[in-house]
Image: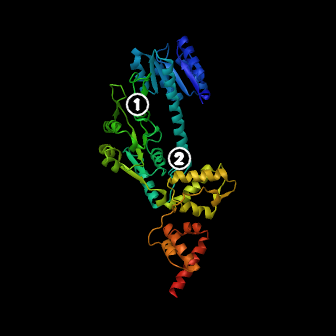
Amino acid sequence: MNHAQKILVVDDDAAMREMLASLFASNGYAVETADSAESALEKNREAEFDAILSDVRMPGKSGTELVGELRELRPQTPVVLMTAFGSIDSAVEAMRVGALDYITKPFEPAAVQLTLERALERRVLEEENKRLRKAVDRTSALGDLIGDSPAMREVFALIRKVAHGRSNVLITGESGTGKEVVARTLHFHGARAERPWVPINCTAIPAELLESELFGHVRGAFTGAHASKRGLFEQAEGGTLFLDEVGDMDFSLQGKLLRALQEREIRPVGGDRAIQVDVRIVAATNRDLQEEIRESRFREDLFYRLNVIPIHLPPLRERRGDIAPLVEFFLAKHGGGETRGVTPAAQRELELRDWKGNARELENTIERALALSDASELEVADLPPGPEGSPDAEIPAGSSLTRMAREELALKDLEDLYIDAVLEYTQGNRVKAARILGIDRKTLYRRQRQRDEETED
C-alpha cells in the first residue's frame, strides 16, 4: 500500500520541496526531503527509499551526478528527474546513466503523481524479478517447470539449448499448460537472467492503449498524456519482453510490432525520435496462428518473425505421466509448510481426469482440496467433482479398456486386463502403474510373472 512506500524529494527550491512533499503525503506516501544531492546521498546511506524524485540543476552535484552515485549505492531504487523544458538534453543524458524517467517543469500535480506511480511500479517489478530468480534457484534444474513425460523432457532439452541465445521464441499450447512458466524459465536460465523480465498480457489492455504501453509516449501525444512515459520495450532493455496471448493483438498494431522486431528500434507515440532497443521477445498464444493467418487476423510476416524457435506444450491429457509430479509440486506449494499427500485412490482419480484447464485447473483442484481438508492425505471425496456427462479419459480403440467394455470376462481376466490398461496408460512404467493400481511394485511383477507362466503352460 502507498503508506508503506518511502519517497525522497530532492530539490534546492524549498517551495518546490514543500509542494511535492505535501502532494505525496496527501496520497499516503511517507515522504522525506533533501535540499542537495549530497544530502540525498547521505539519506540513502542511512535508509532505502522506494523512489526518488530529484531536480537536475542544483548547486554542488547535479541530479545527473546523483543518479550516477545512486547506481552504485542503491542500484534498485528508481530515480525520476525534474527539469526545465530547455534542459531536456541533460535529463536524457541522466537516463542514459540510470535514471528511470524525467518530467519537465512546469508540471501539473496529476502528472508528477502519475510519473511517481510508474516509478514505483518499476520498483515492484524489480522486486518480483528478484523473487522469481530466488524461486528458480530454490527449485529443480528448470525452476517451476515440472514434468516427466517424453514431451516435457523435449521441452527441457530445447530450453537448455536456446536459453542463452537472443532469437525470438513462440510458445503455443492450450490455456493452463504453463506457457508463462516456460517463458520465465527461458529468461531466468539464460544470459539475460540479471536483466529485466517484463511480461504483458495482450488481451488485458485495450488495443488503443497497448501501443503506448509497448512503445511509450511523449508528453502531449494524446489527451491525458501529461508526462512522457517509457514503454515496456525500454523497460525491458537488455532483458526479455514476454508477450502473452500475442494472437489476440489488434491487427493494426501487429505491423508496428513487426517493425520494432525487424529494426530493433521503437518510436514512442507522438515522438519523432527512434530509440534503439536490445530486447529478446518471447511470445505465447493459445490460438492456432496458422488458422488466424488464413482468416487474415494475424500477419504472416509477424508470425515468422516471432516463430524463430517454436515450443509447443501439449495438453495435460496427452502427457498424463506429468500429473503425479505436478500433484506433488502443488501439494508442497499450497500445503502451508505441512507435509500433505494423496491416497492411492485419489491419485488414480486425478490421473484419469481430462483436465480441460490443464495444469492451472489441476493446481486449483489441489489448492481447494487442501483448504477444505484437515487430513494429512487427500481422499477422493476431498476432490471437486469432474465435469458431468463426459468421460474424463479418452479410451483408445483396441485398448485393453475397450475389451473390458465389450466382452463378458471372468473376474481374474478383468483384473489382468485392468493391469494391462494401466500399463498402456503409463507407457510401460511399472512404478507408476503400481501406484495407480494401489499395489506394491513387487506384487505387480509377481502377477505378471504368474500370468506369463500360465500362458506358457
Which disc number belongs to residue 70?
A: none
Residue type at mark 2: give it: Val
In the displayed structure image, the side of residue 99 where residue 324 appears, left or right: right
Count of picture labels: 2
Q: Is residue 166 above or below residue 311?
A: above
Residue 44 appears in view: no
- Determine which residue is flagged by label 2: 136
Q: Nearer the viewer, residue 420 or 406?
A: 406
- Percent coordinates x, y for residue 306 in the rendering: 35, 45
Q: Give the CA separation, mark 2 to mark 1.
A: 31 Å
Which disc number belongs to residue 212?
A: 1
In the displayed structure image, the side of residue 298 where residue 1 appears, left or right: right
- Seen as rendered, the residue at the extreme bottom is 457
Q: Nearer the viewer, residue 213 or 274?
A: 213
Q: Secondary structure at mark 1?
A: helix
Q: Is residue 22 above or below residue 99?
A: above
Q: Is residue 411 above or below residue 432?
A: below
Residue type at mark 1: give it: Ser
Q: Residue at x 58, y 62 (%)?
A: 349
Q: Is residue 40 above or below residue 275?
A: above
- Percent coordinates x, y for residue 345 in the rendering: 62, 64
Q: Residues within 10 Å of mark 1 (few under 14, many from 20)?
A: some
Q: Are marks 2 and 1 in contact (CB under 8 Å)?
A: no
First in sequence: mark 2 or mark 1? 2
